[in-house]
Amino acid sequence: MKETSEATIDKILKAQREFFGTHKTKSVEFRRNQLRKFKSAIEKNEKKITNALHQDLHKSYEEAYLTEVSIVLQELQNHIKNVKKWSKPQTVSTPLHLLPSRGSLHHEPLGVSLIIAPWNYPLQLLMNPLVGAISAGCCAVLKPSEFTPNTSQVMQEIIAETFVENYITLVQGGQETGEMLLRKRWDLIFFTGSTAVGKIVMKAAAEHLTPVVLELGGKSPCIVDETANLEVAARRIAWGKTINAGQTCIAPDYLLAHESIKEELIEKITDSFKEMFGSYPQESRFYPRIIHQRAFDRLKGLMQDGKLKSGGELDRDNRYIAPTILDKVDKSDPVMQQEIFGPILPVLSYSNVEEALSYINQNEKPLALYYFGKEKNAREILTKTTSGGVCINDTLMHITNHHLPFGGVGGSGMGQYHGKESFKTFSNQRAVVKTPTWIDMSFKYVPFKHFKWIKKFI
Ligand code: NAD
């Protein structure tokens, strides 16, 4: 992947600053038109996008549509419908001592934003933040991952055909381009990727006091207790672990299974893998591939831990790893020390839920947490843990509700987006107080006449 030169980036940034300075992006009609154009462009290019995703990750048309294209289209529809309402100044209540002033909240665009995305959902994770940027009235420079060249190329064409360069531009490149972009001054950096690079982003942003949104990863636990419907739990876990071959930030990373149901659960998950992909998942058109050989080698290394219960087949040339379950892993094994980000499911068992909760709480705060079992137990788990999002008796599905914000907490990130949260993320919430001049109360001025009365009112 060719890197973008510093001169090009400086030119784009200068042009975007000038364009933002014209205040054109602040008109709600302008924003809605851009969102409508963007939606038509995605619809028109649907086939090109899904073909590119197949080339890069072997995603089936169905998976590419459901987990990438449709997510962006729904987000666009939601913003087209609501941006006018969200943009209206909101009157707030006025405390007695401020009367007859009136307070209101105005959302104004932060300015020129930088959006950096990873490779695992290359379309969705670059375009969804962009919807928020447009709807808030920001300009944006986009940098996709260098590891999905086909999808990145299609996205570059779509962006170039749909928007003028001094409003929204996509630049290609890898780490070098990323580092150069981070040296520049932005009004917001929206980063999705690994925790390690997230730290680099935040350090660079501190130099200019630029706000950041960090959508990071980590190990999302999945607890299954003896009250769970094992049939359904197994199917939903198997599905969440094999969508995009486990290369999903909110995939259930590892299982914490009650010792009384562990064996049965493992058998049922194995059966579910078979139901979805047959006896030879490598031959299934629905089973994606590992992004590159470096990731393949890392995952192969993690498969040495514990005891192999199912799967385990590998094909390096094809970057194929079968859905795999590892039992009897140790908490100190590499597979339990790093985010897996592949189709490997290690299983830990527990006898008392406190053990499971204490293990989760010793580690970084996860991006997602899954629990399968009865409502009464779910309440305890919610109270005694934290995470960016939660599904009770399901996996992944919380991300599909655009009325819920999406984001991490602590080590899994900061800031949230989707739906109205995206609009707010790219906006400055400006506090405005309007005060009439027909009256000018003297008590706030020195020498504070009637001080005793003022004390009673505030
Ligand atoms: P990554 O951090 O390696 O790369 C992400 C982006 O940052 C890429 O565009 C890359 O080119 C760029 N980059 C790499 N090094 C850089 C540097 N030094 N300076 C500036 N930019 C740099 O992540 P990845 O391997 O592409 O993606 C996998 C990670 O992303 C996993 O940890 C996963 O959990 C996380 N992720 C999180 C979410 C979420 O929504 N929270 C979604 C998807 C993936």
Image (cartoon, rainbow, N blue to C red):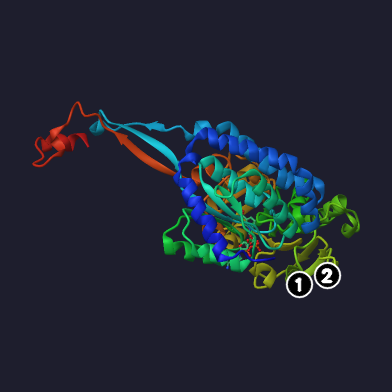
Which amino acid type is shown beneath numbered disc 1? Answer: Asp
The foreground one among 383 and 166 is 166
What x and y, as percent, mark residue 425? Answer: 50, 46
Mark 1 or mark 2: name the one nearer the start of the chain: 1
For label 2, the SS is loop
Which amino acid type is shown beneath numbered disc 2? Answer: Arg
Image quarter where the N terminus lies is bottom right
- Give the residue at x 55% y 67%: 179
The foreground one among 404 and 196 is 196
What residue is disc 1 on? 297
- Give the residue at x 59% y 63%: 359
What x and y, as percent, mark residue 102? Answer: 31, 31
Ligand 1 image position (quadrant): bottom right
What residue is disc 2 on? 316
Image quarter where the C terminus lies is top left
- Give the residue at x 8% y 41%: 447
The foreground one among 93 and 232 is 93
Q: Quadrant of residue 347?
A: bottom right
Q: Does residue 22 appear left or right of residue 146 in this picture?
A: left
What x and y, as percent, mark residue 184? Answer: 49, 62
> What whole-number distance in Å separates the C-alpha atoms at marks 1 and 2?
8 Å
| Position of 98 relative to 188 (above/below) | above
Q: Does residue 204 appear left or right of residue 382 in this picture?
A: left
| Position of 214 relative to 5 (above/below) | above
